[in-house]
Image: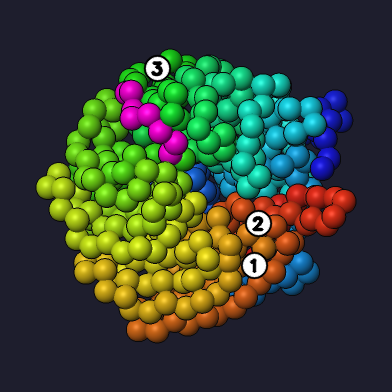
Amino acid sequence: MSCFCFASAPAGRCVRRRLVLLVQLLALGMMTVGQVASAADWTQWRGPFGNGVAADGQSIPLTWDSKKNVIWRTDVPGRGHSSPTIVGNLIVLTSADDATQTQAVIAFERETGRQLWLTAISQGGFPELHQKNTHASSTVASDGELFYAVFNHHQKIEAAALDSTGKIVWKVDAGGFNPQLYKYGYAASPTIYQNTLIITANSDTVSWMKALDTKTGRTVWEQEMPKGLVWSSPIVGQVAGRDQLLLSGFEQMAAFDPGNGKSLWSTPCLTHATCGTAVWEDGVVFASGGYPKAETVAVRADGSGKILWKNSVKCYEQSLLVTRGHVYAFSDSGVAHCWEAKSGKEMWKSRLKGPVSASPILVGDNILASNELGTTFVFKTSPAEFKLVSQNQLGNESFATPTIADSRIYLRVAERDDNNRREYLYCIGNR
């Protein structure tokens, strides 16, 4: 893989656009009160609503390859699985160079793919890692002004805030992270709630959840968590009439007050280790997990602890999708599923191809689901039957979840052979 070269990183300045093309808040509690989504931006892991649903009114191409409908392609130095975060003219992601043990935040120009800046955050102290993980797997979050990244090194989690020119505004040691039983690395992405950045780090030696002030990095609140390996990212949604911070894992589905971190409710279910992010609709939370057992579950989020349904489908690393009364999944083995949200009734399942790590994304009535081999399947949100629209290939390695903004698809993929690996960021759009 190529090494970072900070001295020769392209210089450039970025002019931020004000958020435009404001869309209405999604109905049925699909997003947090006070947030407004723009079709032009994708501000965090799982998108503007935190649930893998793109803003309305976008017209993306449904077929592509390395040449067809490619607006541009750019080299990504290093290696990472974080998804692109898009605000204004900037596309921002994290990457890591294993040779120099350097972790960095990189920005590209949105219209051309040209690298604008690369800011090193840390060097050295890389932990042991599962072969499918990277040292830059957490997606950057943005409040429209600053970009927030988290990295694991030197047995800790470090959080950093950068401005649109790549300047570090603040950088803090958020807390320890030192797994011993399974040295698989770190993967959770941060989320923003009001003026705080919420971070989790869960291992068998130290386990915590913390909110940092977005302007200063100062700790606003912190909560000790059960000890154990959980890689799921926290997310805030308006569920059952209030804002709830949702987190799966530790053999439970749990909700917390995002304002102070205190527990709202928890329901025994799932399995110990989960990686996917919870989704919600009509007062019900849906999640899946995969170690040591496989389970997908629907839990009523009113504090009653009622489990509406569960099954044995395994979505270990990837998240689910829920829309218009139905839950969609792309399981580890590459099987697409559709269930009725209120009952768990199987509407259909169809074998595509795995293995799968990236989470599916919903754009209009189309679902984009990528596997680890660089194949992205597009199929309809049709409960009556499975309707495959297309099968598209880019590279031969794909772990990052697609990003959708302003009717364009941004895909981070790699091309690997026996002696070389190169990583690319593609912009796919109607030409």
- The answer to whether residue 13 is magenta is no
Indicate the secondary structure of the residue bearing disc 1.
strand
In the image, which is nearer the foreground, mark 2 or mark 3? 2
Indicate the secondary structure of the residue bearing disc 2.
loop
Residue at 26% x, 58% y: name it: 298
The picture places residue 387, in percent across and down from the top left corner, at: 47, 82
Q: Are marks 1 and 2 in contact (CB under 8 Å)?
A: yes
Write down the region rendered in magenta. 223-230
Seen in the picture, residue 52 relative to 15 is either above or below; the reply is below
Amino acid carrying mark 3 in the image? Thr
Amino acid carrying mark 1 in the image? Thr
Residue at 66% x, 27% y: name it: 126
Q: Quadrant of the N terminus?
A: top right
Identify residue for label 1: 375
The residue closer to the viewer here, 330 or 332, is 332
Q: Is residue 230 visible?
A: yes
Q: Earlier in the sequence, mark 2 or mark 3?
A: 3
Quarter holding residue 408: bottom right
Distance between mark 1 and mark 2 Cα atoms: 8 Å
**Can you tell which mark lies on residue 219?**
3
Residue at 67% x, 21% y: name it: 125
In the image, which is nearer the foreground, mark 1 or mark 3? 1
**Can you tell which mark lies on residue 112?**
none
Identify residue for label 2: 398
Q: Earlier in the sequence, mark 1 or mark 3?
A: 3
Q: How many marks?
A: 3
Distance between mark 1 and mark 3 Cα atoms: 41 Å
Position of 392 compared to 214: left or right?
Answer: right
Q: Residue furthest left?
A: 304
Residue at 51% x, 29% y: name it: 179
